[in-house]
Image (cartoon, grey):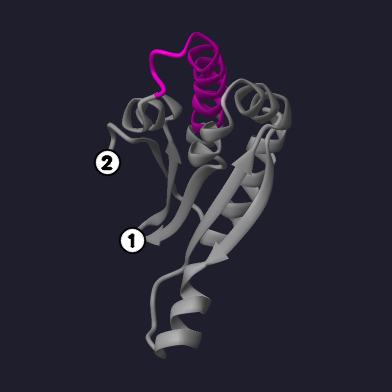
Amino acid sequence: MKNMAYEVTVHAPFDEVQAQVIDALKAEGFGVLTRIDVHDTLKEKLDVDFRQYAILGACNPPLAHKALSNRPDAGLMLPCNVIVEAVDGGTLVRIVDPHAMMNAGGFADDPVLKDVGSEAAARLQRVAQALAQ
């Protein structure tokens, strides 16, 4: 999955890492628009036990506005998903790579979206680096 995401394993409990992720995203201008608690949802809907696992929908409003103003269908790539998952020895964080999303969505040749994607990628890479420290 490393071609689609930046991955970092943090040797700390899930709840602590999730808070660190939200803070690191905030420091790079991203807010969390959505939070899907997969553990609770699967318990409620299927009555199955699943590890702690959350999907955060992160958005940088200026970048989203620029992308959507250029191409409304760029909304298919929004928000930037971040997975926080309990694993043996800590918590795994996966942050979507905007370049991979642009390539998959057929947006890579659009110069405005290329700029937006590059800026988002740089910011999200810094989030991953902050978590790795």
Please identify the residue farthest to the bottom as the structure is shown.
47
The residue that label 1 is drawn on is: 88
Q: 73 or 6: which is nearer to us? A: 73
Q: 33 or 2: which is nearer to us? A: 33
Answer with left or right where residue 38 lies relative to residue 65.
Answer: left
Q: Earlier in the sequence, mark 2 or mark 1?
A: 2
Rendered residue at 70%/27% (across/down): 65
Q: Are marks 2 and 1 in contact (CB under 8 Å)?
A: no
Q: 71 or 5: which is nearer to us? A: 71
The quarter holding residue 100 reads top left
Q: CA distance from mark 2 to mark 1?
A: 18 Å
Q: Secondary structure at mark 2?
A: loop
In the image, residue 124 lies in the stretch drawn in magenta: yes
| Region rendered in magenta | 107-129
Q: Secondary structure at mark 1?
A: loop
Does residue 13 appear anywhere in the picture?
A: no
Image quadrant containing the N terminus: top left
Q: 68 or 84: which is nearer to us? A: 68
x and y, in percent, of residue 11 in the image: 45, 49
Does residue 85 appear anywhere in the picture?
A: yes
Residue 60 higher or lower than 13, as above or below: above
Type of amino acid under label 1: Asp
What's the magenta bit mostly, secondary-structure-wise? helix
x and y, in percent, of residue 48 in the image: 37, 86
The residue that label 2 is drawn on is: 1
Type of amino acid under label 2: Met
